[in-house]
Image: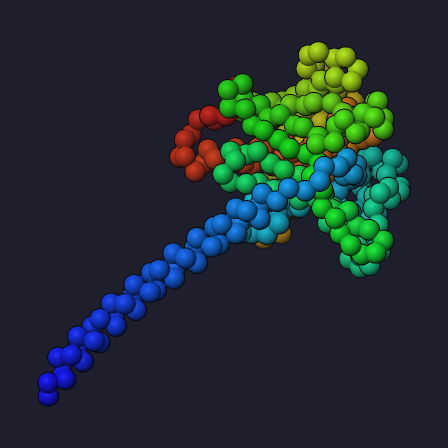
Amino acid sequence: MSNTPLLRNFNGFDSRNSFLRIKISAIVLLSYLLLSFTFSSHIEYPNDISRIPYVYRLRFENIWNHNYIIESLSTGNLKEHEFNDEHKSLNSDSINYKNVKSGSLRLADINVPYWSLGNFNVLEYRYNQNNVVDIVTTVRTQLNYTIRNVNITFTAAEQAAIIDPNSLEACDYWIDWTQRMNGYIWRKCKHVDEENFTKVSYFKGSPNWGLDFWNLDESVKYGYSTQTSFWWNLNKREIFVNHSAPFPPIFPSIYIACYDYILRAKNSRGNSSDFMTKT
């Protein structure tokens, strides 16, 4: 009989400890996942020149996050493409299709780290003959809240200038846009002694319904994106860029990623004003 109170005390003590252990385990697990996600996203990859083709598909990685994937397109997707004559050898340069059965190859990721205020990294995949996949960093972006634009830097700009003095990747760029969803691409090429940014392209349209990229007087179309599919199809859209465009083929995707990020940021703040764009 004398052992009964001790048994009740022991059981009560064990119940409280079980609840405490569950809380501690949950905190430890959450911390581990957060740290793993943070540090894995800060892996430094070597810099390299971008190899994004002039025709490709852009989509979300999955329905749970807002990272983007750039994929190659098969020639069957080009029948209605207005730049079709330029791209008969679609994606043939610098891409190894060995062991690719689906006809679509994952070319790059646009990573959208939530803690960096929209500063994205573009990671591209290099498929080697020995089936080893190398990952390289080709583009970094930085949103500027003061002058309301996004700066685009190619990580291997110096290397690109050495290989080809006229390389578009050897230049610096920034993009701005308005509430009417039109804007400009600006460019400065230091390797040809340009001291100031100048407008090189005008664009208009909607990232969801389709974008058009033009020269400044809208007489020459440099590229366009198609209408976006539904969210359960991961917001797929095709992007086509003319070889004569004064910007690298990655630019439509950069703008789409930045615009979507700003829209999500605005909605999360419950602010009806477009706090990061100009009228």
Q: Which of the pair 180/128 is nearer the observer? A: 128
Residue at image position (74%, 17%) is 190
Which quadrant would the N terminus be assigned to in this image? bottom left
Q: Quadrant of residue 155?
A: top right
Q: Which of the pair 185/224 is nearer the observer? A: 185
Left or right, 32 with respect to 150, comes to: left
Left or right, 168 with respect to 33, comes to: right
The outermost residue toward the left is 2
Q: Which of the pair 111/88 is nearer the observer? A: 111
**How is the rendered protein coloured?**
rainbow
Residue 112 in the image: x percent, y percent?
A: 57, 40
Q: Quadrant of residue 11?
A: bottom left
The relative height of residue 107 versus residue 210 in the rendered view (above or below) is below
Residue at image position (80%, 56%) is 131
Residue at image position (89%, 41%) is 88
Left or right, 207 with respect to 270, comes to: right
Residue 9 in the image: x percent, y percent?
A: 17, 75
Q: Residue 224: tell me if it is visible.
A: no
Q: Residue 24: tell me if it is visible.
A: yes
Q: Quadrant of residue 83?
A: top right
Residue 130 in the image: x percent, y percent?
A: 83, 56
Residue at image position (75%, 42%) is 56
